[in-house]
Image (cartoon, rainbow, N blue to C red):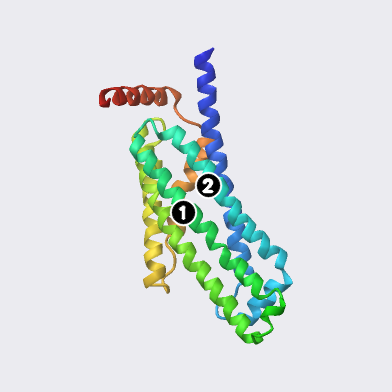
Amino acid sequence: MTNRTAKTSLLIYARVAGLLYLMMVPLGFFGMYSHSTLIVPGDAVTTVNNIMASAWLFRLSIMSALVVQIVNILLVLVLYKLLKSVSKNAAVLMVIFFLVSVPITMLNELNQFAALLLLSGAEYLAEFKTDQLHAQVMIFFDLHEHGINIAQIFWGLWLFPMGYLVFKSGFLPGILGILLIIGGLGYLTDSVRFFFFSDISPIVLYTFWGELLLPLWLLFKGVNVEQWEKRVVESALRENREQ
């Protein structure tokens, strides 16, 4: 009975991790959709008019970005629970890289709030001309984009230890680990591209498959319980030898 309960608990962890990971997809796409709909690069007037006409959509995009980060915290903790038996050091590194990205991304949303404040019509803004306010709004949107690309560095870095853990685990398909590492390279390459070659199209759109297939696998297939238990035993033996 105890063994059956442990297996059920493990599969629940796996499915929770898959569900949390997949939750980021609609939330992330909603943010991308709202930005592409409202913000017109190089056209401050149209952008401001769009935001003023759909302020609720803009605010929802900010909220979705914040919710994603809360989901991320829960996700990485569940993944740590699942993967730490493979290599505790690599699992800790995975958690550190990912958690570093969370405050960067959340604080970056202040740039979006700043744009809203500039359009709030507050009395202290009367000293600025309309075109000056519009120009400042666009500056904050540009800063937000730069902030996303800074956070993207850590979105890439955390995939390396996670990809290694999945590849070495034995209780998840090794190919998923390889795809995760490729996805990490995609994020890092795009960060370099943004800062030095911004006219080149992003490549992460072609390297994200690991981050899609892993949560689907966790949600619908779970993990190989016997192999996971074997890893737990091996991890305990390693810790005993090191003590």
Residue sitting at x 54%, y 23% = 8
Q: Residue furthest front?
A: 124
Tell how many labels: 2
Q: Quadrant of residue 127?
A: bottom right
Q: Is residue 60 above or below residue 136?
A: above
Is residue 220 among what the camera can see?
A: no
Query: Which residue lies under the disc numbered 1?
Result: 101
Q: Is residue 86 above or below residue 185?
A: above
> In the image, 69: left or right of 196?
right
Tell me the quarter of the image containing the N terminus.
Answer: top right
Q: Residue furthest top?
A: 1
> In the image, 126: left or right of 167?
right
Residue sitting at x 50%, y 22% = 7
Query: Which residue lies under the disc numbered 2?
Result: 72
Amino acid tagged 2: Asn
Q: Quadrant of residue 129?
A: bottom right
> In the image, 27: left or right of 198?
right
Q: Quadrant of residue 170?
A: top left
User: Are the residues at dot 2 and dot 1 in contact (C-beta closer than 8 Å)?
Assistant: yes
Residue 31, horizontal then vertical, whole percent: 60, 60
Residue 183, horizontal then vertical, whole percent: 40, 52
Mark 2 lies on a secondary structure that is helix
Residue 78, horizontal then vertical, whole percent: 50, 36
Tell me the quarter of the image containing the C terminus.
Answer: top left
User: Which of the two residues, 146 or 120, is positioned nearer the viewer here?
Assistant: 120
Residue sitting at x 59%, y 54% = 66
Amino acid tagged 1: Ser
